[in-house]
Amino acid sequence: MRFQQTNRTPYLNRGDQKRLLVLVGMIAMIVFSIEFAARPSSWYWLTGRPAGKTSDAATQEAQTPSTEKIDFRPDMKASTLGPQVIRVVGGKTPADADRYKPDAASNAPPDTAEHELKLAPELIEQIKDNAVGIRESERELYYYLLAKTRDVPASTLENAARPSIAFAVLMNESKDLLGEIVTVKGELRRLTPIPVGKNEFGIESIWEGWLFNADSGLNPYCIRMTSLPDGIPTGQDLGSGVVVNVTGYFLKRYGYPAQGERLHVAPLVLARSVRWLRKRPSSIPDDLGIVPYVLGFAGVLGVTISIMLFRFRSSDREFEKKHLRRLTTAPEGAIAAISDLPTFELEESLRQLSAEHASSVEIVEDEDQRSDTACE
């Protein structure tokens, strides 16, 4: 009986079984990590729980993007200003001025209480959503909010701001969000000064910025502010890379003339200034969110798996070498015993073979002669 030997690694030993078990456990851990990361509640430690939501079902509902199509057309049925009239300058009656006292004056003490930052319902009723430009009825409220954001500390506004509101929510549910304090982050593509009308709130300069982010896509936010951070670029075309964070009042869906003699609407945010974050290439998305953390975790996991597989493979090769060496190594003393074996020369062997052959031929000839003699 002959046994065929092989140099393949036997995977029935305990060490290899443990390593296979570790690989199965790593695959199970990856599947569990995917399921865990898919739940929004798993990231509350990083993003915080959405305001007003206490259950996972409510949270999922809040984070589900709206599929309703956004209507960017202004309301042309209402009495609005002409398409080319974007800012209105005019007087106001004393009765109108009294509605904004006592905290509207530029020298008033900053508001710190949350209820002082909220707009009264009668002020919100003056806002005409989806209208083109700033209407005459909104004019005093417009300057009032600019003065309010100027006088209130930035930290107070940021603490009172609502959690991140998606662009689609801000556009589709604007009627419920008029006068709310919001925070928006993105890239400024245009930043220019605009004329300031007569007002009694001490507003002397207004800057208009058009802000884009990954949430809004090709649709901008319109930002109006009374001051700018030092060194920030200004102009009609800033390109990409001017990343800012702005907190202010969401006034309304603001109608403005767009390209091609069309009218368009955008969220109008009134703020004191913007917080200039940094400059970077436009190829990097505006708001990465948890993407860096997910990519970092995936990178660490990939490197760990690669190292373990490399070590497993190296161990297998080392085992194969040892196993092959064990099968092919000569027994102890076998090499030394070779020197004791008898040796012979090739020529001598050939002479012996020739002699043996000649003797065998003679024997055959003798036998043939004897057989012939017997026959005679």
Image (cartoon, grey):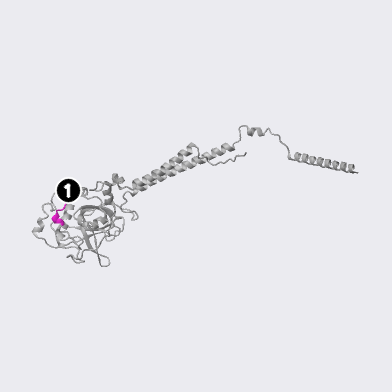
Query: Which residue corresponds to mark 1?
Result: 114
Q: Which residues are magenta?
A: 117-124
Of 59 and 331, nearer the camera is 59
Q: Residue at x 47, y 39 (%)?
A: 17
Of 98 and 89, nearer the camera is 98
Residue farthest along the front direction in this orientation: 375
Q: Quadrant of residue 357?
A: top right
Q: Is residue 202 above or below residue 350?
A: below
Of helix, strand and loop, which one carries label 1?
A: helix
Task: Point out residue 80 in the picture as x, y percentages from the top left corner.
Answer: 18, 65
Q: Looking at the image, can residue 300 be seen?
A: no
Question: What amino acid is found at the position of numbered circle 1 in the picture?
Answer: Glu
Task: Point out residue 137 in the picture as x, y percentages from the top left corner.
Answer: 14, 61
Quarter of the picture containing the N terminus is top right
Q: Looking at the image, can residue 28 be seen?
A: yes
Of 190 and 140, nearer the camera is 140
Residue farthest along the bottom direction in this orientation: 261
Q: Is residue 62 above or below residue 75?
A: above
Q: Is residue 85 above or below residue 282?
A: below
Task: Point out residue 373 in the picture as x, y percentages from the top left corner.
Answer: 89, 42
Crowding near pointer 1: few (<14 within 10 Å), some, many (20+)?
A: few
Q: Residue at x 44, y 40 (%)?
A: 21
Residue farthest along the right direction in this orientation: 376
Residue 207: say if magenta.
no
Q: Residue at x 39, y 43 (%)?
A: 29
